[in-house]
Amino acid sequence: MKKKIFLAGLLAVVALSLFGCGKSLQTRIEENLSEHTCVYYYAEGEGYYATLSSGEREDEYLLNGKSEKKVDFALLAIKPSVGTSEKIIKANVAINGESKLYELELNDLNFTYMVDLEQRLSGDESISVEYAGQTLEMQNLSKDFAIDDVKAIEIACNELSDKIDGIRRGNNLNAECYLRVLDKKANNFDNMFWCFTVVTTDKQTFSVIISTVDGSILAKSE
């Protein structure tokens, strides 16, 4: 009887182990995404340009290698053509005809003004932004990406599999991941790129830049 109980318990442990190991690398990464950009809008005028990235992100945005509670986001960024000393600017954003005034705070790292609209965009919205007397109609550029966000994550998983395997501990990834769209204007190219970054619990980081056109790897941290 004791032998049967022992064998039954052993089989249960093996089954649980197999179940845990059954998670693919992509599934582990998707569970640990602290920022997952899905939709990207863009507009450019003489006085400024604006971007609007939307998806899901970590509620408390901390680069600590841990991915916790997620919330919807829509991050609006405005970069004036002429520098300003203002710490806060105001802009009207109209989504499907409903307008709201927002305050955008200056990001000292890239001199861009930002605000989270705290919602998730589908990509089908009609969006305009008005700042400094100029109204721009935003275009959803991500809908024309040949490589969408899901495919970009798959490509990143394959490209970084060796590095990610090195930081796994059983079912735990011991890291958080970020998928963003690189700013069209800021990167000095006409094309758009996906940027996938991994931040480990001991603050190591590695990234890969992926073409939205053909999925090719354009840059990779060593």
Image: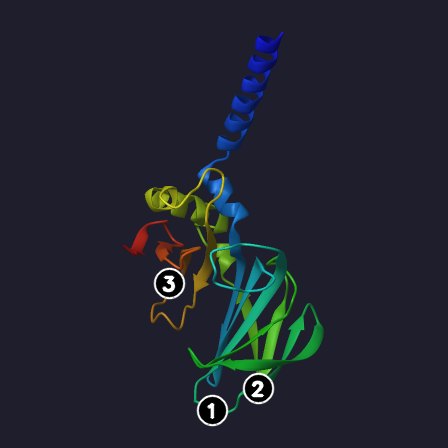
Label for residue 191?
Answer: 3
Disc 1 on helix, strand or loop?
loop
Q: Amino acid at mark 1?
A: Thr
Q: Give coordinates of residue 138: x percent, y percent.
A: 55, 70
Could you tell me how far apart the alpha carbons at marks 1 and 2 are, in whole angstroms?
10 Å
User: Is there CB contact under 8 Å for labels 1 and 2?
Assistant: yes
Q: Would residue 72 be found to the left or right of residue 173 on screen?
A: right
Extreme bottom residue here?
A: 85
User: Is there CB contact under 8 Å for labels 1 and 3?
Assistant: no
Disc 3 on helix, strand or loop?
loop
Q: Would residue 58 be found to the left or right of residue 212 on screen?
A: right
Residue bearing mark 1: 84
Extreme top residue here?
A: 1
Q: Amino acid at mark 2?
A: Ile
Task: Point out the frontmost of discs 2 and 3.
Answer: 2
Q: Residue at x 62, y 69 (%)?
A: 127
- Determine if residue 47 is in view: yes
User: Is there CB contact under 8 Å for labels 2 and 3?
Assistant: no
Label for residue 89?
Answer: 2
